[in-house]
C-alpha cells in the first residue's frame, strides 16, 4: 500500500480499508492508477493517495464510514468520462472507484424497470434491456465506457432527451451511501409516491457531493419497431427550429432525437475522422440530423416524415435531404454527429460551452454569440452543434488558423464568461448536461442567483457538514 502524504491517511486507516475491500479492492499499481487521474480533455491532472474499488454497497459504506471518522475526503468516480473535472481527486484524498459494482440486480419487462449497480457501463444496460425487448433510452458518445453512477450524478442528457428526458427523468429510485457511511435505501419502483420530499433528486446531478450513488432503479420503454433517420440541409438556424416543430406535429411527437450541426463541424468530421463522409452531394451552411421512431413496423412513419420534408422544401425551410435506406446508413449519419466531436481534436485548441436556452431562442443565441466570439478572439472558428430539440447546444470555438494552441486556450475563461453572459441574459443555463465539477465553480458563483447558492450550501451542510464528500466540486 502506498505511503500517505496526508497525515490523516495513516497506515492504520489504509489497513482498515484493506481489511474491508481486500486485495481486489485496492489499486496500488501506478500504471493502473494513472488513467483514473487524467480528465479526458486534459484540463485537470489529479492525484490520489489511495484508490479503492469496493465490490458491494456494504463495502462502500464501510470505507466511507472509516474515512469520515479519520477526516479523509472521498472522491467518487465512475467511468471517468466527465468533462468538468468532477471526478478528479487530489493528494490526501481517497479515490473511490465504483467499477467493480457492475451487476444488474433485476430487470422486469412487465414493470418496465431495471435495477442496477452504479458501475454498470451504459451500453451494457442498453444491451440488457434489448435482450428483454425493451429500450433504455439514455444514449451519449461515451456510452461504451461511462457508468450509470456517473450518468446519474451528473444528470446526463444525450441525444434522446427530446423524447425521454434527462437521466433524472429515467430514475424511479436510488440507493446511496451518505457521507457518514449510512445507507439510504430509496430503491423504489413506484411511478407515484407523494410522501414528502423526493430525496433522490438531491443526489441526481449532485456530482457526488452529497453521497455516493451505489444503485438505481430506472425506467424502461418499448423498443421501437420502425425508425426513420434523415440528414437535412436547412436554410438557417431558424429553419431548424421550424422543421423540428413541424416534425413533432406531423409525427404526433415521435421525434426521439433532433440535432443541429454547423457546416464547420461536418467539415472537421469528414476531414479528420475515418469513415465520415459528406451526407449530401452539395455543401450547405446548416444541417439538421433527426430520428423518429414508432412502435409498429407498418406505422406509416416514413411517409409522414417524407411528406413533412417535402412541404418544408416547398416552403424554403429545407434545401436538401437524404433519408436512411438501411440501418447501416442510419448509423453512418449518426457517426457523423460523433465525428464532429472527434474532428475538433486534431484541428487545435477548442474552447467549449455546454449551454441551454429555450428552444425557440436558439437562433437568437447564435446571432448574439458570433460577434462576441469574433470580438474576443478574432479569427476563431465556431463549431456549434448539439441537441437543438431540447435547447442544448455545444457551442465550441476552435482556435484561429495559425495561432498557438496554448496562447489560444488562455482565453478559455474570458470567452466562457462572455458567452455565459448571453446565455444567462436569455434565461438559459451555463451547463446543460455536463455538470459543474471543478471547471465551472467560479462561473456558477458568478451567475447563479445568491438565494439559489445559499440553499445549495444549506443542503450541502445538512448532508456533509465536514465537507469530505467530493470537496471543491459544484460549490
Image: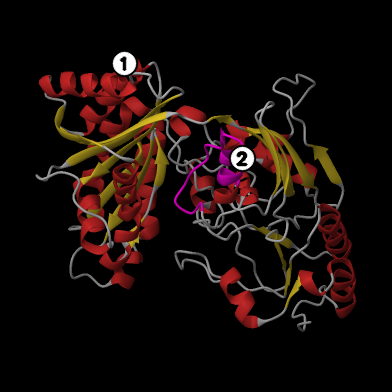
Residue 215 placement: quadrant = top right
Q: Is residue 377 visible?
A: no
x then y, percent, for residue 259: 33, 38
Which residue is farthest bottom?
3
Residue in front for this viewpoint, 105 or 394: 105
Q: What residue sits right under mark 2 in the picture?
A: 453
Left or right: residue 461 versus residue 151 is right
**Residue 306 against residue 412 in the figure, above or below:** above
Residue 78 lies, in percent from the top left, at: 63, 57
Residue that numbered label 1 is attached to: 250
Horizontal side, residue 2 vs residue 249: left or right: right
- Residue at horizontal 51 percent and vertical 31 percent from the top: 223
In this figure, which colouring scheme has been used for the structure? secondary structure
Residue 332, numbered label: none
Q: For the residue labelled by badge 1, is the local secondary structure a helix, a strand or a loop? A: helix
> Does residue 222 appear left or right of residue 111 in this picture?
left
* Label 2 Cα neighbours within 10 Å, binned few <14 / some 14-19 / many ≥20: some
Q: Position of residue 426 (x, y in %)?
A: 37, 31
The part of the chain drawn in magenta is: 125-143
> Gap in Å between the C-alphas at discs 2 and 1?
42 Å
Please report whichever mark, 2 or 1, sits nearer to the chain's N-terminal start. Answer: 1
- Crowd class of label 1 (few under 14; some 14 to 19; many from 20; radius 10 Å): some
Q: Is residue 29 above or below residue 220?
A: below
Quadrant of residue 451 within the rendered picture: top right
Amino acid at each position: 500500500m502506498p505511503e500517505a502524504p496526508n497525515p490523516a491517511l495513516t497506515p492504520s486507516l489504509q489497513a482498515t480499508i484493506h481489511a474491508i475491500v481486500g486485495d481486489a479492492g485496492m489499486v496500488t499499481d501506478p500504471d493502473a492508477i494513472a488513467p483514473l487521474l487524467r480528465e479526458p480533455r486534459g484540463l485537470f491532472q489529479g492525484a490520489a493517495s489511495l484508490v479503492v474499488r469496493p465490490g458491494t454497497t456494504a463495502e462502500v459504506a464501510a470505507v466511507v464510514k472509516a474515512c469520515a471518522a479519520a477526516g479523509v475526503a472521498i472522491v467518487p468516480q465512475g467511468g471517468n468520462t466527465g468533462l468538468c473535472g468532477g471526478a478528479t481527486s487530489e493528494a490526501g484524498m481517497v479515490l473511490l472507484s465504483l467499477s467493480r459494482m457492475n451487476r444488474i440486480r433485476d430487470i422486469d419487462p412487465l414493470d418496465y424497470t431495471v435495477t442496477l449497480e452504479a458501475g454498470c457501463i451504459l451500453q451494457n444496460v442498453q444491451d440488457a434491456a434489448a435482450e428483454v425487448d425493451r429500450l433504455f433510452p439514455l444514449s451519449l458518445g461515451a456510452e461504451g465506457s461511462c457508468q450509470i453512477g456517473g450518468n446519474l450524478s451528473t444528470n446526463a442528457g444525450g441525444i434522446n432527451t427530446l423524447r425521454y428526458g434527462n437521466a433524472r427523468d429515467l430514475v424511479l429510485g436510488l440507493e446511496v451511501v451518505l457521507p457518514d457511511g449510512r445507507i439510504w435505501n430509496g430503491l423504489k419502483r413506484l411511478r407515484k409516491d407523494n410522501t414528502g420530499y423526493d430525496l433522490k433528486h438531491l443526489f441526481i446531478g449532485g456530482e457526488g457531493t452529497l453521497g455516493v450513488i451505489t444503485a438505481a432503479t430506472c425506467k424502461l420503454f418499448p423498443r421501437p419497431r420502425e425508425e426513420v433517420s434523415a440528414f437535412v440541409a436547412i436554410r438557417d438556424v431558424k429553419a431548424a427550429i421550424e422543421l423540428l416543430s413541424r416534425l413533432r406535429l406531423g409525427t404526433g411527437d415521435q421525434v426521439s432525437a433532433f440535432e443541429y450541426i454547423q457546416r464547420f463541424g461536418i467539415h472537421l468530421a469528414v476531414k479528420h475522422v475515418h469513415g465520415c463522409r459528406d451526407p449530401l452531394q452539395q455543401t450547405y451552411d446548416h444541417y439538421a440530423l433527426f430520428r423518429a421512431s414508432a412502435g409498429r413496423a407498418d406505422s406509416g412513419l416514413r411517409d409522414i416524415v417524407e411528406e413533412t420534408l417535402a412541404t418544408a422544401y416547398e416552403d424554403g425551410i429545407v434545401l436538401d435531404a437524404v433519408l436512411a435506406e438501411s440501418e447501416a446508413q442510419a448509423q453512418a449519419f449518426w457517426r457523423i454527429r460523433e465525428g464532429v466531436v472527434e474532428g475538433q481534436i486534431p484541428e487545435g485548441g477548442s474552447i467549449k460551452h455546454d449551454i441551454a436556452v429555450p428552444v425557440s431562442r436558439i437562433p437568437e443565441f447564435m446571432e448574439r454569440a458570433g460577434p462576441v466570439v469574433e470580438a474576443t478572439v478574432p479569427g476563431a472558428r465556431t463549431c456549434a452543434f448539439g441537441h437543438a430539440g431540447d435547447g442544448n447546444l455545444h457551442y465550441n470555438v476552435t482556435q484561429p488558423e495559425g495561432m498557438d494552441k496554448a496562447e489560444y486556450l488562455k482565453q478559455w475563461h474570458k470567452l466562457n464568461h462572455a458567452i455565459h453572459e448571453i446565455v444567462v441574459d436569455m434565461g438559459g443555463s451555463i451547463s446543460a448536461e455536463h455538470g459543474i465539477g471543478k471547471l465551472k465553480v467560479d462561473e456558477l458563483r458568478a451567475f447563479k442567483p445568491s438565494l439559489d447558492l445559499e440553499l445549495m450550501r444549506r443542503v450541502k451542510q445538512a448532508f456533509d457538514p465536514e465537507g469530505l464528500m467530493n470537496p471543491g466540486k459544484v460549490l
